Image (spheres, rainbow, N blue to C red):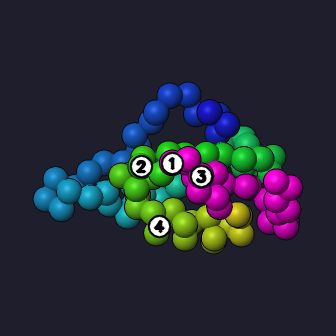
Amino acid sequence: MCSGVKGRLTLLRWDRDMDMATADDTERWLDHLFSAKAVARGGVIRRSVAWVEHEIGRERFIGAVAERGFSLLECGGQFVVICQRGPIRRLL
């Protein structure tokens, strides 16, 4: 994976009564994702749409990418995050 994380890590602790992740766990998941070396280098990270929706939800993920000023693409069941704030030019 581009993020430097080997294998699939589930970092969320689920609240059994509500069957959803707590806010602290969601923030930990996002902190872990955005602490990847690729992010620091202005590179690219990708995650399965289904996994993101299961772990923290689509809207929360989109918001986290927007908060950082990054660009987000969705293609082939994957979210692709461009970890720089500059403009993007699609060539093809």
Segment tinted magenta in the rendering: 72-92
Image-based side of 28 in relation to 44, left or right: left
* Location of residue 35 in the rendering, given as x and y in whole percent from the top left corner: 64, 48
Q: Quadrant of the N terminus?
A: top right
What's the amino acid at mark 3? Cys
Q: Is residue 4 magenta?
A: no
At 63% from the left and 71% from the top, the residue drawn is 67
Q: Are marks 3 and 4 in contact (CB under 8 Å)?
A: no
Q: Residue 75: which numbered mark, if any?
A: 3
4 vs 88: above or below: above
Distance (Cα) linking label 1 and label 4:
17 Å
Residue 57 horizontal side relative to residue 36, left or right = left
- For the C terminus, the image quarter is bottom right
Q: Nearer the viewer, mark 3 or mark 2?
A: 3
- Say which label, 4 or 2, has the lower sequence index: 2
Residue at point 73%, 55% (across, down): 82
